[in-house]
């Protein structure tokens, strides 16, 4: 009996592994085809995530896309890098900043959340703050929100949130999405799709030679109290620490 069992198990694995790989490939191809055919923001986001630049024309073309939370999203025109950097210090009156525990507490039901994306070193230079321990890799990327790096956000449950996302990186695509699924995240953070609350495409890096950066705006709400997370869906970024916590209460 025991001998039989031991012979049975190894016989399954090579074939089923191959099967799983083939199924995964088919799924990826279907996703890419859908993204091309339908031109939906989310699918463009996915294709950007996977690193295909042929969609970037569409991505910059202007359209709306949202999942979950409800609301609309759209591309802004390019904004000046200098204006975006000064934005981060212009904190609205309803934000309390706790530098010691890297937290921003919002006390309004109508919130503008300016989220900047960039490399960790640029974030340190800009804010003169340190990133959280999990995002201290200098080759990694980070979010800067009102002068803090990947801060914890405390938000009232019924607040309407206007996300103003600006990519200040000199070379990488980024986005910011909200989800109930926490870290750790994988290279392609598909686990974040469980409990997804808001989604946007990845957008192009800034152009430091002419001083302009890409911006994308969307409006969302959490509705229910709980712990949520914001992260970048571009492959590898969340895995290396490009994420932060949101407490909705
Ligand atoms: Cu990113």
Image: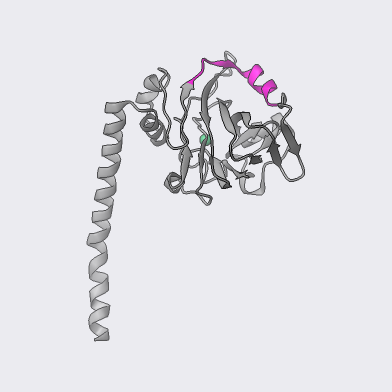
Occupied quadrant, residue 35: top left
Query: Residue 100 location in percent, x, y?
Result: 77, 44
Query: Residue 132 location in percent, x, y?
Result: 67, 45
In the displayed structure, does residue 36 sit left or right of residue 161?
left
Q: Which residue is at 40% across, 21% downward?
A: 63
In the displayed structure, does residue 171 sit left or right of residue 133?
left
Q: Nearer the viewer, residue 197 or 135?
A: 197
Q: In this picture, is 115 found above or below 9?
A: above
Q: In this picture, is 196 found above or below 9?
A: above
Colour option used: one colour
Q: In this picture, is 73 found above or below 18?
A: above
Query: Residue 188 location in percent, x, y?
Result: 43, 44
Q: Which residue is at 74% across, 36% downward?
A: 97
In the displayed structure, does residue 233 sit left or right of residue 129?
left
Look at the image and say whether residue 173 sits in the magenta stretch: no
Query: Residue 244 location in percent, x, y?
Result: 60, 43
Look at the image and say whether residue 79 sits in the magenta stretch: yes
Q: Nearer the viewer, residue 59 or 209?
A: 59
Span shown in magenta? 75-88
Instruction: Quadrant for the C terminus, please.
Output: top right
């Amino acid at each position: 009996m025991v001998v039989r069992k031991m012979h049975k198990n190894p016989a399954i694995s090579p074939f089923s592994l191959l099967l799983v790989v083939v199924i995964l490939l088919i799924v990826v191809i279907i996703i890419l085809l859908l993204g091309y055919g339908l031109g939906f923001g989310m699918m463009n986001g996915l294709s950007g995530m996977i690193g295909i630049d042929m969609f970037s024309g569409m991505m910059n073309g202007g359209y709306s896309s949202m999942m979950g939370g409800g609301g609309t999203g759209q591309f802004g025109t390019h904004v000046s890098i200098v204006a975006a950097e000064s934005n981060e210090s212009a904190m609205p009156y309803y934000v309390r900043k706790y530098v010691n525990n890297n937290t921003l507490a919002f006390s309004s039901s109508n919130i503008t959340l300016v989220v900047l994306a960039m490399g960790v070193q640029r974030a340190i230079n800009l804010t003169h703050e340190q990133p959280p321990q999990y995002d201290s890799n200098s080759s990694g990327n980070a979010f800067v929100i009102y002068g803090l790096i990947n801060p914890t956000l405390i938000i009232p449950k019924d607040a309407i949130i206007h996300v103003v996302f600006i990519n200040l990186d000199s070379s990488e695509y980024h986005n910011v999405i909200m989800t109930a699924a926490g870290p750790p995240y994988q290279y392609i953070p598909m686990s974040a799709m469980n409990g997804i609350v808001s989604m946007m495409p990845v957008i192009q890096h800034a152009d430091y030679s002419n001083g302009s950066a890409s911006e994308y705006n969307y409006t969302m709400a959490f509705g229910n109290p709980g712990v949520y997370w914001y992260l970048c869906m571009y492959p590898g970024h969340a895995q290396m620490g490009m994420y932060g916590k949101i407490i909705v209460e």
